[in-house]
């Protein structure tokens, strides 16, 4: 464990997709992983905005992109982005073959029209 508030690099992600979207049969644009508890939620462009909802409910301030090839972190408390940070427990992204938006089979044909901005 590091001394950074909201960070526990030993905790694995909660799964390959947004916890709440999966439970409700929904879809997401991109995924974010809580750096404290591993909760995977959807980004603010997604219909559910579950990563931000997790921050509001839990107070866990840091998320990392859960997209392949992305390492940046976002701090909800300070509204700051960091290009990189400590490596979190594997896996560090959803599976490379999982599409974005995703998951396959649940994304509506008009998904781009429904993105939040």
Image (tube, helix red, strand yellow):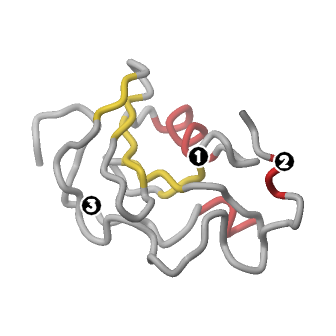
* Residue under the point 11% across and 48% down: 1
* Residue under the point 47% across and 71% down: 15
Position of residue 28 in the picture relative to residue 95 (left or right): right
| Mark 2 burial class by Cα count in 10 Å: few <14, some 14-19, many 20+ | few
| Mark 1 burial class by Cα count in 10 Å: few <14, some 14-19, many 20+ | many
Q: Mark 1 falls on what kind of element?
A: loop
Q: Are marks 3 and 1 in contact (CB under 8 Å)?
A: no
* Residue under the point 37% across and 47% down: 64
Give residue 72's quadrant in the image.
top left
Q: Which residue is mark 3?
A: 11
Q: Which residue is mark 2?
A: 114
Q: Mark 3 falls on what kind of element?
A: loop
Please provide percent x and percent y for residue 58: 48, 38
Please provide percent x and percent y for residue 30: 57, 55
Q: CA distance from mark 2 to mark 1?
A: 13 Å
Position of residue 9 in the picture relative to residue 37 (left or right): left
- Mark 3 or 2, nearer chain start: 3
Q: Mark 2 falls on what kind of element?
A: helix
Q: Which residue is mark 1?
A: 43
């Amino acid at each position: 464990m590091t001394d950074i508030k909201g960070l526990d690099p030993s905790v694995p992600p909660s799964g390959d997709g947004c916890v709440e979207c999966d439970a409700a049969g929904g879809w997401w644009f991109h995924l974010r992983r809580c750096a404290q508890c591993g909760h995977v939620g959807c980004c603010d462009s997604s219909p559910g905005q579950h990563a931000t909802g997790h921050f509001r409910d839990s107070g866990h301030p840091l998320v990392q992109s859960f997209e392949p090839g992305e390492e940046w972190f976002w701090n909800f408390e300070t509204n700051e982005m960091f290009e990189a940070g400590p490596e979190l427990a594997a896996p560090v992204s959803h599976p490379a073959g999982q599409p974005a938006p995703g998951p396959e089979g649940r994304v509506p044909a008009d998904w781009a029209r429904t993105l939040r901005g």
